Image: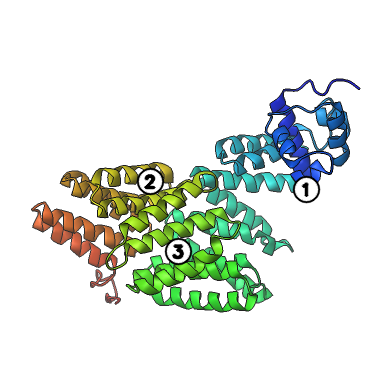
Amino acid sequence: MSEPSQSTPLEFSRRLRALRQARGITQRELAGDTLSVSYVSLLESGRRQPGPEVLRQLALRLSCTVEELRGDVETAATRPSTLSVRFGQLALEAGSPEEAIEHFTVALRATDLDPLLRSDARLGLARSFEARGRLEEAARAYEQLVQEAIDAPTYLASLGVVLSWCGCLFELGQLHRVVEVGGGAMAQFDRLGAWDSDGAIQLLATVAAAHFELGDHDQAERLLREGLDRATRLGSARARASVLWNASQIASERGRHREALDLAEEALAYFRHGADRRSAARLLGAYGHLLLRQDPPRPQEARETLREALDSLTDSGRGFDRGTILVDLSRAYLLAGDADAAADAARQSLVEAGPEAAMQGARARTALGAALASQGDADGATAAFADAAALLSRADANREAARAWAELGNVLAEAGDPAGAVRAFQQATAELRLVQPKRLPGGSGRGVG
């Protein structure tokens, strides 16, 4: 038998992992009775090279020849287009979305790519765009996948894509589109009696959150009550936790902070012991946010919780996930009297979220404005709050915009600009639609309470 490989250790490790995943087997199954899982892990990381006998055992378990495993010959499972899809999936899982984008793009250029693998590549590319903060491109990619699936018999299989699409739209501040897209999917669930999945109830919770951001609190709470009822009938702890999470946020915004904390703790009990690290970390971040809103606030506990959330998102989170947590971390620092650390955390949040995340970017600017005001930089604070309010107004996020305008008013009042403060407070009131709107031609204006 010839020597193991003419390829580099890294090339061999990638080929081994891609073949194993293409066969749908675990490292333990590949190890069998003669190898250890840790040794297979070392092979797949490029830190070990197999000898001839190990190569033979691996090839046998992977249902391929030694030559295929070594890369001496090309097969359907090892040709570049197929491997590019697998490498893209691996890069995305490893937290390297830019590398994943390159692999998926190469795979999609191939004319001989299997149709199912092409679908995998397109979905992987959309998720890579999302992970990189390229939300507009991700939203367009998800939309195209959904539109192509609508007329197919497997339309419901695209539920995860709809959920991801709505998540991107939410971060972009396109809240009415979230309601439109999510509501359309939920109507489909009604027609087909297809509510018995975690994803369907998570989508309901996302639509409820959009309604809340748009100021329709009653509809948001109605949807969440429906979601809790469906999750209970489904018997899904995960679905229930997703709804509880959103219900907690709404209770907090309505001033029911103790109730919000209880709801968050119940949701966190599931996520902390589950396998979904990203959801657990995001909920930890939401829990830290609630600790800051208690009366009195609990900044020390919040800071510890938020740090734990941030640490656990190192490998599994998206930029705007970390950005959200950094906003609350900024507020925790500010409550503890450390304005410099608060400003640094807010600026880091802006970097993490990227330029396209309108909702997150506005919150980070609001936090930065508060930190700058505490530092005595009235001009910087004014600019940050005004940018936040303008961004939120364009995103139809009236409740958040009103908060930013109100904070701007407080800064201007303290800086000795009462006229500017009054204008800011008036804008805050207008955002909440508590004032008489301009009369429209041919009709009468009516304020909405």
Task: Give the residue pinned by disc 3.
Answer: 176
Find the distance from the CA under tag 1 to the CA under tag 2: 38 Å
Q: Disc 2 residue type? A: Ser
Marked residue nearer the N-terminal end (1 or 3): 1
Residue assigned mark 2: 349
Element under disc 1: loop
Q: In which quarter of the image is residue 422?
A: bottom left
- The amino acid at mark 3 is His
Amino acid bearing label 1: Gly
Density class for disc 3 (Cα within 10 Å; few <14, some 14-19, many ≥20) is: some
Q: Residue at x 83, y 44 (%)?
A: 32
Which image quarter is the C terminus in?
bottom left
Going 78% across and 37% down the picture, which residue do you hit? 112
Q: Name the residue under label 1.
A: 24
Answer with mark 2 or mark 3, whichever residue precedes in sequence: 3
Looking at the picture, does residue 57 appear above or below residue 407? above
Residue 216 visible in rendering: no
Mark 2, secondary structure of its residue: helix
For residue 17, side relative to residue 315 (left or right): right
The earlier-in-sequence mark between 1 and 2 is: 1
Circles 1 and 2: CB atoms closer than 8 Å: no
Q: How was the colour assigned to the protein in this rendering?
A: rainbow
